[in-house]
Amino acid sequence: MRASKIALWVAVVPLAFTVFGAGTLQAQLIPGTGQRAAFDDFEAEDWSFTHNFPKGSKEEDQQRRFPAGESKNSLWYEGPKRGQPDIVKRVPTPPGGLSGSKHSMLMRTLHTGIPGRPSYHSKQDDLIFGLNHAIGGFIPTGWSPSTVVRVYFPPFEEWENSTDTTLGLRISVSGWGWDREKKRRGLFGSRRPKKKYETYWPGIFVQFNSETDANVEKDSALLVVRGGSQGQDFGVKEITQTGWWTLGMSVTPDGQVHYYASPGVDNLTAADHLTSQFPYGIKAEKFNSFFFDVISPDDGKTWSTPWVVDDTAVYWNRRVQTATRPR
């Protein structure tokens, strides 16, 4: 599911701590805390991505179309629900990037729905980080997992020219929540919700507000978070500065998700906190990986905004350093 358009307002939530129980406070977890568990900096000279077209479109027509696209180092692969971006390649790092960085990864897409059948509706492709390949499993949230990525926001004149979501940084987490569809009967015929273990995908989305829209005076962008306790999307930060940004998400041992963003490539700090949430009312128990959504209008002719990312990393803070890797 992709992010919906958000009204052009910003709801900043500058909390240092978040209440999650009677008389209890859970501290934030700044993404990048602890040890780096897995990363890709795209500096390997033989870095490449094999697309294996036609790409999958399981979400649209139940077709996976194996083999899936995958990078040579097995750290990036096509998602199981949607295809990978049409362009995934190593490129020179744009100006202002991390010190010493020479190369980054470009993602751009055109055909985001069923191959050969444009829908003329905005859709997304997924590029997933292979955490399982890197560490041999998931990360329990008791180990305080987080992800940090650097993202290059090109000048607004280079963005796909419509008011719409254009990019997403998302994490895959799992935990116990209430089944929102099925209910069971209680003792006297009343219906009670049933608990369900599920995987869900909180994220930070980038929404472009195009001056071609009658309600927009000039080009701008908005960071949108998914999600609130019901999974809803809401705006958190207006983007008036292009160039490099640092985005991050973390999960504390209580299962809460924390969202961060800052212009530039410096490490994130507490001042960069956007909000903390239990998306869908679920407390996360496992951190499975992170991934990018790249979005286009799927009209067969309009390319997405070109997105460049660098120094993509997952961190953990293992309580027991000798513990075996989770499977």
Image (cartoon, rainbow, N blue to C red):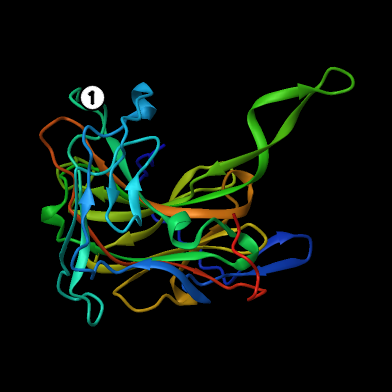
* Residue 194 placement (x, y as % from top left): 73, 31
The amino acid type found where label 1 is placed reads Ser
Residue at the top extreme, as displayed = 189
Left or right, 318 with reference to 77: right
Quick check: 201 left or right of 59?
Answer: right
Task: Determine which residue is flagged by label 1.
Answer: 119
Confirm whether residue 235 shows in the render. no
How busy is the neighbourhood of tag 1: few (under 14 within 10 Å), some, or many (20 plus)?
A: some
Tell me if residue 175 comes above or below residue 48 in the rendering: above
User: Please, what secondary structure does the residue beneath circle 1 have?
Assistant: loop
Residue at x 84%, y 17% (from the top left corner): 189
Residue at (37% x, 28% y) in the render: 58
Residue 241 screen position, x and y as percent: 23, 67
Could you say which is closer to the camera, residue 243 or residue 212?
A: 243
Counting the numbered discs, the total is: 1
Question: Which of the 4 image quarters holds residue 252?
Answer: bottom right
The C terminus - image quarter? bottom right
Residue 115 in picture, x, y percent from top left? 22, 27
Can you say whether 226 is above or below 326 in the image?
Answer: above
Residue at position x 39%, y 35% in the image: 81
Asked where in the image residue 149 lies, by quadrant, the reply is bottom left
Outermost residue on the bottom side: it is: 99
Q: Nearer the viewer, residue 305 or 23?
A: 305
Q: Position of residue 147 (x, y in %)?
A: 45, 64
* Point 45% across, 77% down: residue: 269
Answer whether residue 93 is visible to the viewer in this image.
yes
**Where does the N terminus fall, quadrant-wise?**
top left
